[in-house]
Amino acid sequence: MSRTPDFFEDLRRVGTLKKALLGGRPSDNALARIPRPAVSRDTVGAWLRGQRFPQQLEPLWAVLEEILAECARQGVLDSAADEISGESVAELLAEGRWRRTWRAERQRRTQSNQEDAERQQGRKSLEDEERRTRQAALVDRPRPVRSWTPKRLGVHPAIPGHPATPGGTGFALPAYVPRPHDEGLRTRLSAAVTDSESLLVVVRGESCTGKTRTAVESLTAMPDDFHLLFPTDADSLLAMLAADALGPRTVLWLNEAQHYLDSTAGEAASAALLRRLDGEGPFIVLATLWPDHDKTFTTAPAPGKEHGDPHRQARTLLAQAHYIYLPRSFADHLDAVRRMARHDASLASALEAGGTDVTQILAAGPDLVAHYEYPEGPHGISGQALVSAAMDAYRLGVTGPLPLAFLHDAAPGYLTGGERAAVDTDDWFPEALNHAQTRIKQIIRPLQNVPHSSRMGALPGVVSLADYLQQHGRRSRQPLCPPATFWNAATHHLTSPDDLTRLAEAAYKRHRLRHAADLYRAAADAGNTSALLLLAEMREEACDRQGAERLYRAAADAGNTKALAHLAWMRDEAGDPEGAEQLARHAADAGDPGTLQLLAEKWEEAGDRQGAERLYRAAADARSTKALTRLAGMREEAGDPEGAEQLARHAADDAGNTSAPLRLEVRDREGAEGFHRAAAGKAYPPAQQVEMWERAGDPEGAERLARHTADAGDPRALVQLASVRGQAGDWQGAERLYRAAADAGSTWALIQLGSVRGQAGDWQGAERLYRAAADAGDIYALTLLARMRGQAGDPEGAERLARQAAAAGNPDALPPLAGMREEAGDPEGAERLWRAAADTGCLWDAFNEMPGRWPYGLEADGSASGPWEQPEPRIVVSGPS
């Protein structure tokens, strides 16, 4: 019977023949030794099962030839090869047959591979074309990375040096002085490109320390075929991500990343960008951040306040970042600056000014401050008032351009009565604005025009503040509360709901409750349902439960799931647990299982374990890993360790929650170690990884990883490992690791060392370490020093340190000192400190320690407010439930 040979079917027939006619001889082991070089037994078995194609025919034919010889020895060459084909064994094993079918199969496979490659190339070309089409529809489009200039990417112009052209406005770019962090950054970027990784890099440093220039210089590590996208704002970034425009071999440029990560749009962009980082690479995100913005985004809310977490997605995103920390000065590299200054006029001028803050001097930062703090001319003091109002706006939460009408109405409050009386009312504002827009050192103005995003020219009627002055204002004006004209002007002239909400929060923290309510109302009218929610909370705090519930319902009707949580709490407190549970389940259905979780915790504390477990399970069904973790704890307490571990592992696998497995007792050492090592291989931050390795019983591996990351410039893992060992009672090991982290530049490690010394009774050593941390710029260390001085009976020294900490941005030391003054019988001193705490924006929790004080809040000037009427937002009020 004629048939068309099939290579793999014929191999299977030979395998069957060997087993049926030859009794399995020769064995696969024996056959594996026939070819030269020999092959493995598994390879022979795979050939004779028709499961593998040999890339070379000769090793296969050597095996088949040995089988043919065995057939001759057993006299079965003329026997039928099988019951169907009608072929003999000799015909099946003929050499010419196998050479023909092998060549035919190789040709077929080559053609198939070629067609697959062409199909893949076609799909890739189609995907690239679709991506280009989507990119072409974007407002901000990609361009080759080499086509972007430093000026366009946001590098500050520098002082031009000498000689300078009078009235010149050219963009001066001084020679770049590399430092150790530059080589580390370029190496990391090159590795990401080579390994086709997706990578987020954050260059962190204060204003005018060279963040953007550092990032620009690192682009030399990018191949020429990379493209760069520079979104205008968070909405533009969201559009890029939604259009899938950020393909491989792309750099995403997020200069001053706070503008992209803040607000509701920033949270959505953070979540979408985190998903993109999980996608195909190489894909690089280069971001720059000021330290205070980084702290805002990466600091988790206090326990119990997670439902009000405004930066959860941004914090998750930044936890995956590779940080590059820029030093403030060139103190350790002045010799390199001097060498390059011989051929660079800008660097030479910066050195002539003296000091080690080279980049700040190059950007005319000190000159900007001098122009602001020592105004000259008849309109200088009014121009200073405009800049002060702008400083307060940006330090308290505004992110966008400032309307000139806002500055006009805010400025009078920054002048004394005598200064206002001396102002010419006809032309004061244009002249003050001219002073505030004076060009400094031919490169920068205090108040700057805002360019159009899509065409030439400046946006009319708005300005922005130079970022160096923004940062200077955050420091110099930290202890000051803005005047009433500022709050009123913001309420009437600002239109961004997010800006209004942040200013309202700033007023609220300063106990300026009337202004906070007005700003929340304006934000709610502008469409921010979170502001409506916060306005309802103020009603509830004022004991207006009916008004609060009405606003909560309006916020819930507008789609705010957090309002459902508040309504659930109100129902529960009113003795309606069924209504509370129903509302909590509605919130979970809307994507917020936290209310079920918190309600379950409350019921559990009240002794209703059955009801609590029901709510925990409902929260877990809504993908709350916290609920799964607590259910694991309840199973463990009930004597069901297997069920507990199963739930804890489920929590870990569900969302990368490492807290669940970390809390389990290590009953099965081998299983626990395997679990933790597997977890450590995931994309967890090093600080979490070292904790997992330590708890899994590998302290050497944990310390090795912690020291490796510290050597790379990130000592946080060392600090975390020291903390874990201290909690386990190994204070000697903890102190050794804290000292290593301190040597690597961690001021928090110095503080922890101080705490260890204090617990050991060495208060002198503790204070010395706190002072070292404070000298290194850690303001929390000042707070701890203030508390130590107060406890040591030095109230004046304590107050001086507390005010220093508050001026530097941490007012938390003021309330405890106020309480000490109160207990010591000094009500005037206590009142002074309470007001200072309010002016600096101390958290609301501080005022819980002084019930009855200023029940209606404070006026902007610090005097106690009288009763005032709650503002009514323009909302459609829902009917009663």
Image: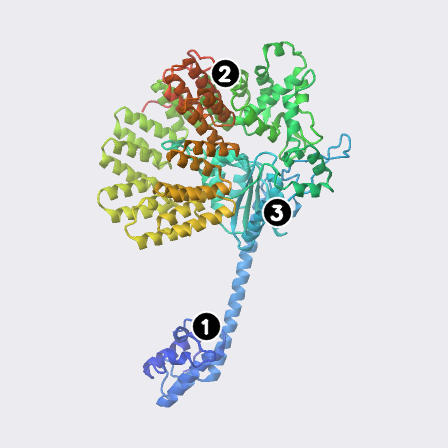
Asked where in the image residue 347 lies, by quadrant, the reply is: top right
Please tell me whether mark 3 or mark 1 is closer to you in this view.
3
Q: Nearer the viewer, residue 773 or 854?
A: 773
Instruction: Decide which of tag 3 and tag 1 comes sooner along the chain.
Output: 1
Position in image of residue 718 (x %, y %): 44, 44
Asked where in the image residue 391 lies, by quadrant, the reply is: top right
Q: Is residue 623 visible?
A: no
Q: Nearer the viewer, residue 457 or 868?
A: 868
Q: Are marks 3 and 2 in contact (CB under 8 Å)?
A: no
Report the residue marked by disc 1.
53
Name the amino acid, label 1: Phe
Report the residue marked by disc 3.
219
Q: Are marks 1 and 2 in contact (CB under 8 Å)?
A: no
**Image point (32%, 29%), residue name:** 568
Task: Determine whether, in the image, residue 752 is placed left or right of residue 429.
Answer: left
Instruction: Decide which of tag 3 and tag 2 comes sooner along the chain.
Output: 3
**Image point (34%, 84%), residue name:** 22
Task: Determine whether, in the image, residue 785 is placed left or right of residue 25.
Answer: right
Please tell me whether mark 1 or mark 2 is closer to you in this view.
2
- Between marks 1 and 2, how big is the CA–CA gap? 83 Å
Q: Estimate how packed mark 3 is, as few (under 14), some (14 to 19) or many (20 or more) residues with alpha carbons within 10 Å.
A: many
Secondary structure at badge 2 equals: loop
Secondary structure at badge 1 equals: loop
In this rendering, is residue 879 above or below 306?
above
In this rendering, is residue 12 above or below 615?
below
Name the amino acid, label 3: Leu
Name the amino acid, label 2: Ala
Report the residue marked by disc 2.
860
- Between marks 3 and 2, how big is the CA–CA gap? 48 Å
Position in image of residue 7 (x %, y %): 44, 76
Q: Are marks 3 and 1 in contact (CB under 8 Å)?
A: no
